[in-house]
Image: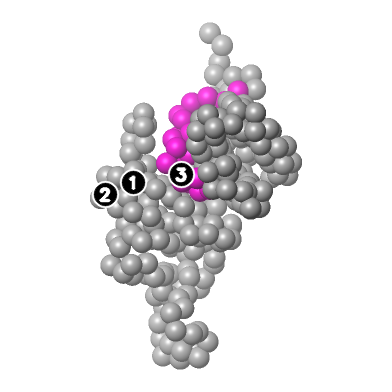
Amino acid sequence: MASTTRRLAAILAADIAGYSRLMGADEVGTVQALREHRAAADPLITQHGGRIVKTTGDGLLIEFGSAVGAVECALALQRLATERNAGIASERRMQWRIGVHIGDVLIEGEDILGDGVNIAARLEGIAEPGGICTSEDAFRQVRGKVEVEFADLGEQSLKNIARPLRVYSVRLASSEPRVAPPASLNGASSLPVSSMPLAGQWVSTEISDAPAIVRRGSVRPTILSANISADSAQSSASGQGPGQSTCATVQA
């Protein structure tokens, strides 16, 4: 019996939101637009160290040797899509949904298989058009290394995945948070993260000298520095305007 080859990999799964609808409206135009998006995206994938494992119509499965490379590539793909969609009617835009996970995979020729691949695909499935969702495993690897904020969506029950997984969504700098998670096991709301009163907390990956406290119960959760002294309070009063807060890394 042949031995099974495995390796640890960061997996990015992506597809175009509403692709079937786009094809129904204009097959020729949609195929051409997808071809152009792919031609623009492929150099970014290579630049970030990705290897395209397979394509499935509008879908992509990409392998990276680094979780940081995978998340940075996801961000680059979404920014590129935003630029390319400028001036296009919303119902005709091509928007990626992306999931990122890091895990053990089975190697079969040039293909990769296993639970890690399935999880990445399910994360992609709960991301909003233009959004990115990552597993907790991926989040732990990129925390403090990627200049972007994450929303903790709590534990999510993903289709055909045996155990619930903690999921994080990426907050893109150019837009409001883009994620519509399914009802979670911890009672998370299905409202957009930007208006969640209790579920989801913004987690900055910027390094700070102080731990963070997330104030819950407000319309938009606020991240505050937990190391408050007379000096720091005075500094905060003189250095920040009304409504500003200090972001710090939250240890998950």
**Observer-nearest of 218 and 206:** 218
Q: Which mark is drawn over residue 184?
A: none
Q: Viewed as shown, does residue 184 lie left or right of 212?
A: left
Q: Quick one: label 3, few (<14), some, or many (20+) residues within 10 Å? A: many
Q: At label 1, which amino acid type do we have?
A: Glu
Q: Is residue 103 visible?
A: no
Q: Quick one: label 1, few (<14), some, or many (20+) residues within 10 Å? A: many
Q: Position of residue 108 (x, y in %)?
A: 59, 19
Q: Position of residue 4 (x, y in %)?
A: 54, 19
Residue furthest to the top in view is: 1
Tell me whether the residue at label 1 lies in contact with that at label 2, contact meaning CB atoms closer than 8 angstroms: yes
Q: Is residue 205 visible?
A: yes
Name the residue located 46 percent from the left edge and 78 percent from the top edge. 244
The answer to if 18 sits in the magenta stretch is no
**Residue at the spot of label 3:** 127
Which of pointers 3 and 1 lies earlier in the amino acid sequence?
3
Name the residue located 31 percent from the left edge and 69 percent from the top edge. 218
Name the residue located 29 percent from the left edge and 61 percent from the top edge. 198
What is the span of residues highlighted in magenta in the rendered image?
Answer: 111-135
**Observer-nearest of 218 and 247:** 218
Name the residue located 62 percent from the left edge and 33 percent from the top edge. 30
Q: At label 3, which amino acid type do we have?
A: Ala
Q: Secondary structure at mark 2?
A: loop
Q: Quadrant of residue 252?
A: bottom left
Q: Secondary structure at mark 3?
A: loop
The answer to if 126 sits in the magenta stretch is yes
In this rendering, the label closer to the viewer, 3 or 1: 3
**Residue at the spot of label 2:** 186
Colour scheme employed for the rendering of this structure: one colour
**Residue at the spot of label 1:** 155
Placement of 52 over or under 183, stated as above or below: above
Placement of 209 over or under 156, stated as above or below: below
